[in-house]
Amino acid sequence: MSTNNIDFDNLTFTFTKTRSMYVTKCKQGDNWNSGELVPYGNISISPASTVLNYGQGLFEGMKAYKTEGGRILLFRPEKNAERAAMGCTRLSMPEVPKNVFLEAVKTVVKDNSDYIPPTEKGALYIRPIVFGSAEGLGVAPSTEYTFMVYCSPVGPYFKGGLTPIKLIVSTQYHRAPLKGTGGVKAIGNYVPGMLPSGNAKKEGFAEIIYLDAAEEKYVEEVGAANFFAVIDGKIITPELTGSILPGITRDSVMHIAKEKLGLDVEERRISIDEAMTAEEVFCAGTAAIISPIGSIKYNHKEHIFSNGDVGPITRELYDILTGIQYGNDRDSFGWILEL
Ligand code: PLP
Ligand code: COI
């Protein structure tokens, strides 16, 4: 799609085709090499590929931001490279080396830089994907892998950006068990959430909150973002047990809370009952940014945290995080990679 047809003032989290994408392949046992930029378009793949049959694949989600002066910034891209590499190991795929990953991301962003929304109107969402692309009938790793990067201009994941969202706790479904693949961005982690999340949306909720699969008591995360509660002025977020995705925004929020706001931060189990006592609750992720949670429904009771206002700590964290991402604030953490 030509950039002339994009309404940058009203972006949502939906897919828009851009000019180009990056692709490289690797045979099992070989090393990944740099690939090439090709026009954005469909790819051809065997119906017997391990990704289509057994879900052998992962994705990453990251963003490129445009500053007021038109500079282009990536936010902590090496963290996405590290997480993708961990995920590759978990899913029996050859790790994409950091330099290949970062080069691909930078190449795609540069070639599609006119698709990056103007400052603070959104961002260019970048999707690196790695998957088993050769045939395999038995349940075993593929003999060939493909690494691609595509992108799309986006607005906030939840409608209304900083408008507090309504969530519901899932009592019927879990996202991920302990010792499974919840801690990596396996593609197979996302489809099980479509049914509960679709049902929740029909009832007017923006998303689901998942509880731990073992005791059904502790908050894990929101379908596509990590969970935070402000209790007695402290920032609490569920500790990483292996079933929760180690969010890069989560890590950034913890640093900002500790080092910029001087708040105590606790990574620990938080029961859903305790979460209901919080002064403020929010979720955080690349797509979700920082989204205030206005209410949570659990076991037929709805707890209201906000009638539309954004809590003061949530607001401060949002302002500092997005200030760094859009280049308005000094990057004292060294998180920004300028292109
Ligand atoms: N949890 C899940 C399940 C996610 O898919 C994401 C998004 O990547 C997050 C949390 C937040 O992670 P990040 O901040 O790295 O985007
Ligand atoms: C992201 O925040 O980048 C994610 O991957 C969430 C996505 C599933 C929409």
Image (cartoon, grey):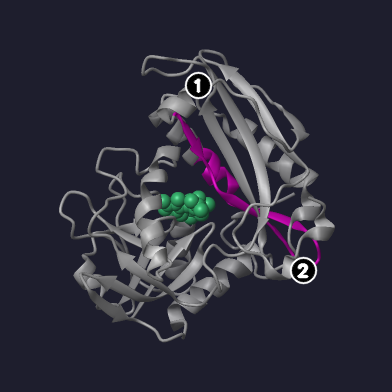
Q: Amino acid at mark 1?
A: Ser
- For label 1, the SS is loop
Front-lying residue, 34 or 47: 47
Above or below: residue 32 compared with residue 235: above
Residue placed at 64% from the left, 38% from the top?
Answer: 149
Q: Amino acid at mark 2?
A: Glu
Instruction: Please provide percent x and percent y for residue 118.
Output: 76, 65
Residue placed at 34% from the left, 58% from the top?
Answer: 221
Residue lying farthest to the left in this orientation: 215
Residue placed at 63% from the left, 33% from the top?
Answer: 148
Q: Is residue 284 left or right of residue 219?
A: right
Cβ at disc 2 under 8 Å from ligand 1: no
Numbered marks: total: 2
Dividing the picture into quadrants, the one containing residue 200 is bottom left
Q: Which residue is mark 1?
A: 49
Is any atom of residue 12 visible in this view? Answer: yes
- Per the image, is 279 magenta? no
Q: Is residue 2 left or right of residue 65?
A: right
Residue placed at 49% from the left, 67% from the top?
Answer: 290
Instruction: Please provide percent x and percent y for residue 333.
Output: 56, 59
Above or below: residue 219 compared with residue 98: below
- Nearer to us: label 1 or label 2: 1
Q: Which residue is mark 2?
A: 68
Q: Earlier in the sequence, mark 1 or mark 2?
A: 1
Q: How many other residues sit within 10 Å of disc 2, few (<14), some (14-19) or many (≥20)? A: few
Q: How many other residues sit within 10 Å of disc 1, few (<14), some (14-19) or many (≥20)? A: many
The boundaries of the magenta stretch are 56-82
Proximity of marks 1 and 2: CB atoms separated by less than 8 Å: no
- For label 2, the SS is loop
**Marks 1 and 2, Cα distance to the nearest angstrom?**
44 Å
